Amino acid sequence: EVQLVESGGGLVQPGGSLRLSCAASGFTFRTYWMNWVRQAPGKGLEWVANIKQDGSEKYYGDSVKGRFTISRDNAKNSLYLQMNSLRGEDTAVYYCVRDEGYCTGGVCYLLFDYWGQGTLVTVSS
Amino acid sequence: AIQMTQSPSSLSASVGDRVTITCRASQGIRKDLGWYQQKPGKAPKLLIYAASSLQTGVPSRFSGSGSGTDFSLTVSSLQPEDSATYYCLQDFDYPVTFGGGTKVEIK
């Protein structure tokens, strides 16, 4: 059974830092792109970042670029999100998401097929 | 970044109704679009990928169509368990972007 379990959320002051972790099990972690997606309270979904299987490619949303860093440890089946210079608008539930990926005819599509339960990050003084 | 505009933002329909949600991209995105369903307090669930491909295990009453800039998600016969918020997502270019969501309520 595929499981994604996030941890590391909590209350942090504006300007502070936090590191989220995601423990993956039930699948061959090293063969999948992985993502972070967040949702502010009562708001819609926002893609945060993703990382290639070997960590050689990383992409970020505009609102977190330069402040957040995604990383992974395939030996530990773990995904991470280092969040620096946190702002109130970063308050959200952060989901760890697997990308199954589907390629056909030279085009590849994202398939966010498994999501964790989320961890809440609250940025407030 | 590519903007994804969903409409309507909310709707109310009866069981058995045919319901259609639309998503418009600010530029052409081929068929690089997915649809997700989210129920309160739960993580989103993938329904459709590549604009019209049904994810394994998703009921056949859900269907997707469109290409370029205009897309739609249709529920052919609305069921009580379909009460949820639906989001489109474009993966044509980074950053990946979601639509604002459509909340579907059952009358």
Image (cartoon, rainbow, N blue to C red):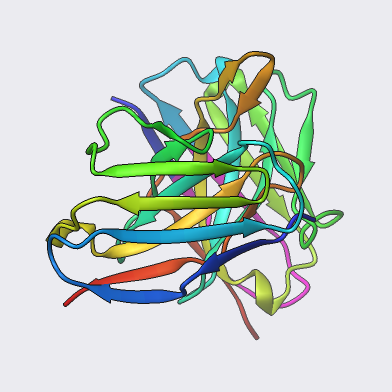
User: Which percent across, then down, holds residue B56?
Assistant: 31, 27
Query: In front: B77, or A43?
Result: B77
User: Which percent across, then down, holds residue B45?
Assistant: 37, 46
- Locate the N terminus of chain B and report the quarter of the image it occupies: bottom right
Q: What stretch is highlighted in magenta?
A: A6-22
x 79%, y 23%: residue: A56
Return the residue found at the far bottom.
A125
- Locate the C terminus of chain B and report the quarter of the image it occupies: bottom left
User: Which percent across, then down, holds residue B33?
Assistant: 57, 42
**Is residue B68 shown left or right of residue A41?**
right
Quadrant in the picture for residue A66: bottom right
Quadrant in the picture for residue A84: bottom right
Query: In front: B73, or A3?
Result: B73
Quadrant in the picture for residue A13: bottom right
Query: In front: A51, or B6?
Result: B6
**Is residue B51 shown left or right of residue B76?**
right
x 74%, y 58%: residue: B26
Query: Number of callouts in the render?
Result: 0
x 15%, y 57%: residue: B79
x 37%, y 70%: residue: B103
User: Which percent across, then down, holds residue A47?
Assistant: 63, 52
Whether residue B79 is situated above or below residue A6 in the rendered picture = below
Q: Can residue A59 be seen in this view?
A: yes
Query: In front: B56, or A125?
Result: B56
Q: Does the magenta stretch include residue A13?
A: yes
Whether residue A112 is situated above or below residue B76 in the rendered picture = above
Q: Is residue A13 visible?
A: no
Q: Is residue A58 magenta?
A: no
Whether residue B6 is situated above or below residue A3 in the rendered picture = below
